Image: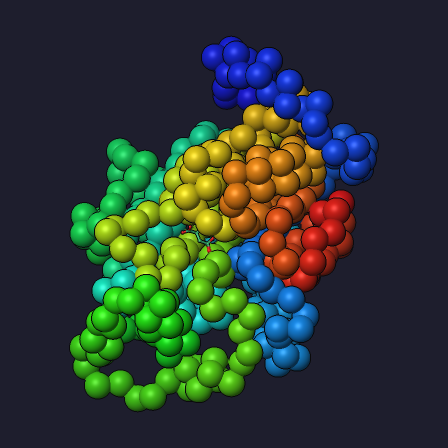
């Protein structure tokens, strides 16, 4: 049963016109598939990720990270845990992993700091929480969840968001915790191209030992060091509740307090039981303008498209048409996973209660199902 009422029906006729342009591909309808007990789908960012630009060690590192993320989520869900807990736990793990642009390993702002964004949404109640511009909270996804559960608001930003998260007892870190040499070098390259003087290199508040993971990261061959790497998870639990969450450091050398789509409900994250759950990654400015996650859900609910059809239309017609790049992962009405992206690759994985799972990095295929 949808929460949304007749007010959205107005949009249906407009959408119906563009629906005629949908590609003729015929993905398996979720309605024909057997019901799932639980499912989970994950992304670790989309971008110019090609086989040629990755060495075996880097590919293995991402595959291992996605494997671990799936294991964390499926362990919770297969034991009857709630999707909200699965989404938070998986994203916390990805935030701790410096391979991804979220938490530790996040990209840096023009002034040489960090400004982290995250959001989470429940499909059963349409409750949502979001934080933007965090600078010292170890797990932004937990701050988003706390905003949803322990504040009367949906979105908190800047110092106030850091303060709220601290008051909630969430772990606070020296911002240097997020620092990696890889992202610092990436910032320097962007600033050089921009003709802007580099800020002072961030220093730890207290002396720290050289990080082993920094050495390891330096040995990897990253295909796309400037943008993407955002993480997102959508999960459905045994009660049929769909939850979606997203976490990011944003885009390299962002300035003026720039906020992307990741903490924007309807753009970076959206969930509504029996309709969809979505997490986005890509150039946030386009995802915000197209309200990408909400647009896909609307097509499913109002036009009766399958998850794959709706996602492909919005990504390949609307996003591509506007000049944006990136992708989404999603669960459709029955919890079946799908994904769509217009970049060369997207780190992505899914697992379902029927024992199906897939981990993919490279070129576009017709989606999970
Ligand atoms: N969507 C994110 C942003 O624009 C970036 C990303 O997905 O990598 O902030």
Residue in the foreground of this view, choosing between 197 and 353: 197
Front-most of residues 63 and 285: 285
Q: Position of residue 127 (x, y in %)?
A: 41, 33
- Does the rendering let one see residue 349? yes
> Residue 254: x percent and y percent?
32, 57
Residue 271 is left or right of residue 33, and the answer is left
Q: How is the image coloured?
A: rainbow
In this rendering, is residue 18 above or below 182? above
Q: Quadrant of the C terminus?
A: top right
Q: How many numbered discs?
A: 0
Locate residue 108, reporting x and y percent.
Answer: 33, 65
Q: Quadrant of residue 199?
A: bottom left
Of 10 and 19, nearer the camera is 19
Residue depicted at x 38% and y 47%: 260
Q: Quadrant of residue 305?
A: top right
At 55% across and 59% down in the image, what residue appears?
A: 47
Q: Position of residue 1 (x, y in %)?
A: 58, 21
Left or right of 310 in this view: 85: left
Q: Nearer the viewer, residue 222 or 240?
A: 222
Residue 72 visible to an observer of this rendering? no
Q: Relative to residue 323, is residue 50 depicted above or below?
A: below
Q: Residue at x 37, y 76 (%)?
A: 185
Reply above or below: 86 against 253: above
On screen, residue 51 versus residue 3, left or right, reads right
Q: Residue at x 41, y 82 (%)?
A: 214
């Amino acid at each position: 049963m949808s929460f949304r009422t007749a007010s959205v029906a107005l949009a249906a006729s407009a959408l119906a016109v563009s629906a005629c342009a949908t590609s003729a591909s015929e993905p398996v309808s979720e309605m024909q598939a057997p019901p799932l007990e639980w499912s989970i789908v994950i992304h670790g960012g989309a971008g110019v990720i090609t086989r040629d630009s990755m060495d075996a060690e880097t590919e293995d590192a991402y595959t291992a990270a996605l494997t671990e993320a799936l294991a964390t989520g499926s362990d919770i869900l297969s034991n009857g845990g709630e999707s909200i807990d699965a989404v938070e736990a998986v994203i916390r793990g990805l935030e701790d992993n410096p391979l991804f642009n979220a938490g530790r390993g996040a990209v840096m702002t023009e002034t040489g700091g960090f400004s982290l964004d995250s959001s989470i949404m429940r499909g059963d109640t349409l409750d949502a929480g979001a934080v933007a511009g965090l600078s010292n909270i170890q797990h932004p996804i937990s701050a988003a969840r706390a905003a949803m559960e322990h504040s009367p608001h949906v979105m908190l930003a800047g110092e106030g968001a850091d303060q709220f998260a601290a008051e909630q007892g969430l772990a606070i870190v020296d911002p240097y915790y997020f620092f990696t040499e890889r992202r610092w070098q990436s910032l320097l390259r962007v600033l050089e191209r921009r003709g802007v003087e580099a800020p002072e290199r961030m220093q730890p508040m207290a002396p720290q030992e050289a990080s082993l993971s920094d050495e390891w990261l330096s040995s990897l061959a990253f295909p796309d060091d400037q943008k993407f790497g955002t993480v997102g998870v959508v999960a459905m639990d045994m009660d049929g509740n769909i939850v979606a969450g997203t976490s990011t450091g944003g885009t390299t050398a962002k300035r003026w307090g720039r906020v992307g789509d990741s903490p924007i409900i309807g753009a970076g994250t959206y969930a509504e039981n029996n309709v969809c759950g979505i997490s986005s990654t890509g150039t946030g400015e386009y995802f915000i303008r197209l309200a990408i996650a909400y647009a896909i859900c609307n097509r499913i609910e109002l036009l009766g498209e399958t998850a794959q059809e709706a996602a492909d239309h919005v990504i390949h017609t609307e996003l591509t048409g506007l000049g944006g790049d990136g992708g989404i992962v999603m669960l459709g009405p029955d919890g079946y996973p799908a994904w769509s992206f217009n970049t060369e690759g997207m780190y992505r994985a899914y697992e379902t209660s029927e024992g199906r799972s897939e981990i993919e990095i490279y070129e576009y295929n017709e989606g999970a199902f």
